[in-house]
Amino acid sequence: METIIIDAYNLMHKVAELRVLLKQDQDICVDTMIAKLQSHYGRANKVMLVFDGMGKNRTLGNISVKFCKTEIANKYENADNLIKHLIEKSRNTKLVRVVSSDREITWFAKDCGCKIQSAESFWGEVKDKRIQIIEGIRESREKPNVVTRGEVDYFLKAFGVKK
């Protein structure tokens, strides 16, 4: 199972869609990110959203929200330090993907053997997957898999075909 560590504020500031939500309300932006990540990754991967500042850590299914400072401890100065710590304590860094456009973080992750991905590229993948799902649903509504006996009878009658 792959672990994806996301520099959350970096992602929010690099992706226009999230930037708009962040200007409205940070909680709405975070909840939107969580919902989209859950629908994209299901339970296949462990995903960690890492934030600067004070907040309450929480876990929703396979998605963890982590803050560098909590009510319990102010152990990490910033999200970068927390991300580095998470990488270092990882059992197998080859199964860790770090999502950030911050050079310092990506260099550190790469040096530790992690896969790296820019925030824009990562969100593009998530967005492309959502588009594929939506198009699949739309297509399935347009083309039924089964034709009922009543529909067959209707068309035979409509086109004047005798049984």
Image: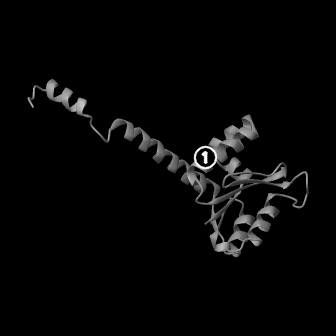
Looking at the picture, how far across and down is residue 81, in whole percent?
82, 63
In the image as oriented, which residue stretches furthest toward the left? 162
- Indicate the quadrant where residue 31 lies: top right
Q: How is the image coloured?
A: one colour
Pick the front one: 24 or 159: 159
Q: Which quarter of the image is occupied by the C terminus?
A: top left
Residue at the (66%, 71%) spot, across then down: 114
Q: Element type at marker 1?
A: helix
Looking at the picture, how far across and down is residue 118, in whole percent?
63, 59
Residue at the (73%, 65%) spot, across then down: 105
Residue at the (60%, 56%) spot, across then down: 43
Q: Which residue is mark 1?
A: 36
Residue at the (89%, 61%) spot, across then down: 75
- Indicate the quadrant where residue 86 lies: bottom right
Q: Amino acid at mark 1?
A: Lys
Looking at the picture, how far across and down is residue 27, in whole percent?
75, 40
Q: Is residue 92 left or right of residue 135?
A: right
Is disc 1 surrounded by few (<14), some (14 to 19) or many (20+) residues within 10 Å?
A: some
Q: Which quarter of the image is occupied by the N terminus?
A: bottom right
Pick the front one: 56 or 11: 56
Looking at the picture, how far across and down is residue 55, in whole percent?
84, 48
Pick the front one: 63 or 97: 63
Q: Is residue 37 left or right of residue 157?
A: right
Count of numbered circles in the view = 1
